[in-house]
Amino acid sequence: MRPRIKLLGTALVAAALTALAAIAAPTPASAATLTQVTNFGANPSNLQMYLYVPNTVAARPGLLVAVHYCTGSGPAFYSGTQYAALADRYGYIVVYPSVTRSSKCFDVSSPQALRRDGGSDPVGIKSMVDYVRSRYAVDPNRIFATGTSSGAMMTNVLLGDYPDVFAAGAAFAGVPFGCFATTDGSEWNSQCANGQVTKTAQQWGDLVRNAYPGYTGKRPRMQVWHGTNDETLRYPNFGEEVKQWTNVQGLSQTPTFTDTPQAGYTRTRYGGSGGTAPVEAISMQGVTHNLPVDAAQAIRFFGLDAPPPTTAPPTTAPPTTPPPTTPPVPTTTPPTPYPPTPTTPAPPTTPGPGPGPLCRVEYTVNAWGTGLTTAIKITTYNDTGVVGWNLAFTLPAGQTITSGWNATYSPTSGAVTARNVSYNGSIPPGGSVSIGFQANHTGDAGKPSSFTLNGSPCSVA
C-alpha cells in the first residue's frame, strides 16, 4: 500500500473505515510460501495467522509481526509490502495477523486490548509469536512489530502491552498507545483521529507503563512515520507519539540528530544519532494518509538488514535482484494522489530550449521478483511550459500497472498514457513533475523505449 488506510467507526466511522483501511500447520510452514496456521494458541478475538518463512533462514532468525490496515488482511499486507522480499534477503521470519471482524480493523481501543494479557487482538498476536518461537530458533532479542494505520496503532499497543517481547516497532500513520481508547464498545475515536487528544509526555508515558504494571525491564525502541497532510489520523498524532515514546525511554523531546533523508522528509532521532536510536521520527511534508511504506528503512531501524548466517543452502534459488530500498514500494490498495507539494522549478539539466526535444524523461525502475516500481521525472524546456499534460509510452510485454501516484494511467498495460491530476497540471518552462507507479511483470522489468509529452517526442535519460 502505499497504504491508504481509512479506519472505521459508527456512521462517521463507516465512511472513514471504508477508505481506511489454509491449512492447519502442526509443523513449521513451508519455506517461501505464505501459509495459514490454525490452532496457534489463545485467540480470544478469532484472528487468523499467516506465516512466511524464507528459503534461507538465519541460524538465529529475527521475527517480524507485520500488521495490516483497516479493510485489509494478512495476505494483502504480504503481497502489498516488501517485508517478505526483504526476509528472503536477510533470513528473518514474518507473521501476518489477519482480522476477521467485519471492519477488518484491529482492536486498539477496548480496555482489554490496552493491558497486558487483557484479551482481544494483542493476546492472539502474542500467541502467534509464541507459536513461531516454539518451532524455530528465534532470537528473543530480535522480535519486532510494524504496521500501517490500524496496524500502526496496533504496533503501539503491542509495544506497550508486551515490552518484554518486542525489541522495537515501526508505525506508519498511527496514533499513540491509548489515544484511541473508548469505553462504549466503539472501535472509533473521532477526537483522537482528528488530532484533538493532547497530553503531557509524562501522561502519555504513564499510559504505556500502566499497561504492564510493575515492569522495570528494557523498553522497545520506536520508529514513527506520518504525513503532514494526513486527513484520516491527523498530523498532531505524530508529535504525541514522539512525546510518548521519548518519555517511555526516559529521553528529552529535543532531538539529538536531524537530517533530510529525501526531499520533503525530516528525520529526527532521540537518545542517539545512529540508525538504531531509541526513538526515530520521520515527518513527510505534503503526504496524506496514503503514505508510502518504506519497509527497507523499518528493517534497517530494527537491525535486520545485515545478511545473517544460514542453517542450510536455500531449497530454491533466492531472488536474483535485491529488493529496492528506495523509493518506498507503494502498497496495493488503490491510492489517492498526493496533495500538491510546493517545488522550486529546477534549471534544465541539458541546454534548452534550443534544437532538439523540448522535454526530457528520467525513468528509474526498481524491480524484484515479479514486481517493480518506477520513478518518472518529466522536465519541459519550451518557452511557455505546459498546461494540461499527458505522457504516452509503451510498457514492455508482461508489465501491468497495479497502482500509481501523481497521475492517472490508462490503460494499465501496452500503450499507456499518464495524465496529470488536478494539482500538477502545469509545468513551467524548465520545471519538472514527478510521477510513478507500481506494476507486476512476467520477466521483463525494462523501460519503455520512447516517450511523448502532449504528442511531442521527449529525450530519455
Image (cartoon, helix red, strand yellow):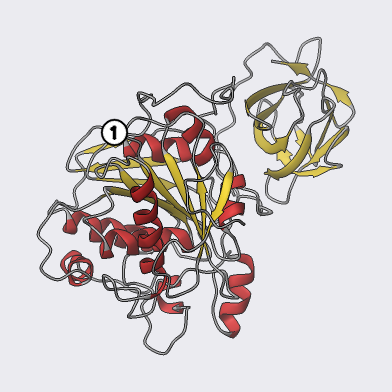
Q: Mark 1 packing: few (<14 Cα in 10 Å), some, or many (20+)?
A: some
Q: Which percent across, then down, holds residue 424? A: 69, 44
The quadrant in which the C terminus is found is top right
How many numbered dots are placed on residues in this image? 1
Quarter residue 436 falls in:
top right
Is there any visible trace of residue 223 in the rendered image? no
Is there any visible trace of residue 258 in the rendered image? yes
Task: Give the residue displayed 63% in from the left and 66% down from the top.
Answer: 19
Is residue 433 or residue 346 the one in the foreground? 433
Q: Which percent across, then down, holds residue 107? A: 44, 72
Is residue 128 or residue 301 the one in the foreground? 128
Quarter residue 205 falls in:
bottom left
Single out the residue that lies furthest toward the bottom: 184
Question: Image height check: is 440 above or below 116?
Answer: above
SS type, badge 1? loop
Question: Image height check: is 89 above or below 335?
Answer: above
Question: Image height check: is 49 above or below 407?
Answer: below
* Residue type indicated by callout 1: Gly
Residue 414 falls left or right of residue 268: right
Residue 94 falls left or right of residue 116: right
Is residue 104 or residue 23 the one in the foreground? 23
Is residue 391 or residue 99 the one in the foreground? 99
Q: Which percent across, then down, holds residue 195? A: 40, 69
Task: Give the residue displayed 79% in from the left and 32% down from the top.
Answer: 399
Q: Which percent across, then down, holds residue 403? A: 71, 45
Task: Identify the residue under disc 1.
Answer: 275
